[in-house]
Image (cartoon, rainbow, N blue to C red):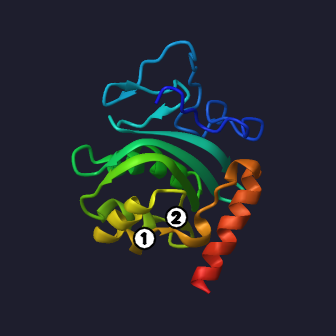
């Protein structure tokens, strides 16, 4: 797990440690010291802690004018034991919403498991951005099945054309444009 790094080719477009509106503003990264772990496996120091023992994030891009953000995730999304959605919502998403963000892209190819509970925080997030949307891209199929079991699919978009294998080859704005086109097509 320590070899899995968040996508860093977009650093020239955005750096959350330099963004005064970011919850990670001013954070200094020591890439020589591995301190965070998930179930005893150290993770790369570039991932950001949001209060969860099992879920870490990296804000890859924010555009306050377009009101969008792209977040990459790593770990196990465990709402049952660790209430990860609460940590994600309260410690990251609420701050982004407070700064005008309404369109969320979460990249989950490094989410290795999901344990659901209820859909309250997902519903709250959905209601907080009634003029926006939430897209989960590149999560594993078995996670999609779990989301359906817990009714999370009523609040987030995923699957189909939102599985974008080459997202790293795009710029953040091109990825946002592609995802937004798919969301508009689904709503239309």
Which residue is at 63% across, 43% downward? 60
Packing grade of label 2 (10 A; few <14, some 14-19, many >=20) is many
The quadrant in which residue 166 appears is: bottom right
Q: Is residue 61 left or right of residue 28?
A: right
Which residue is at 32% across, 34% downward? 53
Badge 1 marks a residue whose secondary structure is loop
Between disc 2 and disc 1, whose residue precedes? Answer: 2
What separation in Å lies between label 2 and label 1 (alpha carbons)? Answer: 7 Å
Which residue is at 30% across, 64% downward? 120
Residue nearest the viewer, comparing 100 with 170? 170
Q: Position of residue 44 (x, y in %)?
A: 51, 26
How many discs appear? 2
Of all residues shown, which one is farthest toward the bottom?
Answer: 188
Q: Position of residue 6 (x, y in %)?
A: 59, 36
Which residue is at 40% across, 51% downward? 89
Q: Which label sits on residue 117?
A: none
Q: Is residue 178 above or below residue 51?
A: below
Q: Is residue 112 above or below residue 135?
A: above
For label 1, the residue is 155
The quadrant in which residue 104 appears is: bottom right
Q: Is residue 134 left or right of residue 20?
A: left
Q: Are marks 2 and 1 in contact (CB under 8 Å)?
A: yes
Q: Is residue 156 above or below residue 187?
A: above
Q: Is residue 113 left or right of residue 73?
A: left
Quadrant location of the C terminus? bottom right
Q: Position of residue 115 (x, y in %)?
A: 28, 53
Residue nearest the viewer, comparing 94 with 58? 58
Residue 70 seen in render: yes
Badge 2 marks a residue whose secondary structure is strand
For label 2, the residue is 134
């Amino acid at each position: 797990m320590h070899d899995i790094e968040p996508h860093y080719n977009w650093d020239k477009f955005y750096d959350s440690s330099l963004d005064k509106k970011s919850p990670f503003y001013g954070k200094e990264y020591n890439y020589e010291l591995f301190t965070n772990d998930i179930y005893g496996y150290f993770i790369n120091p570039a991932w950001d802690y949001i209060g969860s023992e099992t879920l870490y994030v990296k804000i890859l891009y924010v555009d306050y004018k377009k009101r969008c953000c792209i977040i990459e995730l790593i770990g196990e999304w465990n709402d049952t034991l660790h209430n990860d959605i609460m940590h994600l919502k309260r410690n990251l998403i609420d701050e982004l919403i407070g700064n005008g963000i309404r369109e969320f892209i979460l990249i989950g190819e490094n989410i290795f498991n999901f344990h659901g509970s209820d859909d309250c925080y997902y519903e709250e997030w959905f209601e907080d951005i009634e003029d926006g949307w939430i897209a989960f891209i590149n999560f594993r199929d078995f996670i999609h099945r779990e989301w359906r079991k817990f009714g999370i699919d009523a609040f987030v978009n995923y699957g189909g054309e939102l599985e974008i294998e080459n997202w790293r080859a795009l710029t953040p704005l091109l990825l946002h444009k592609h995802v937004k086109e798919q969301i508009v097509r689904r709503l239309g």
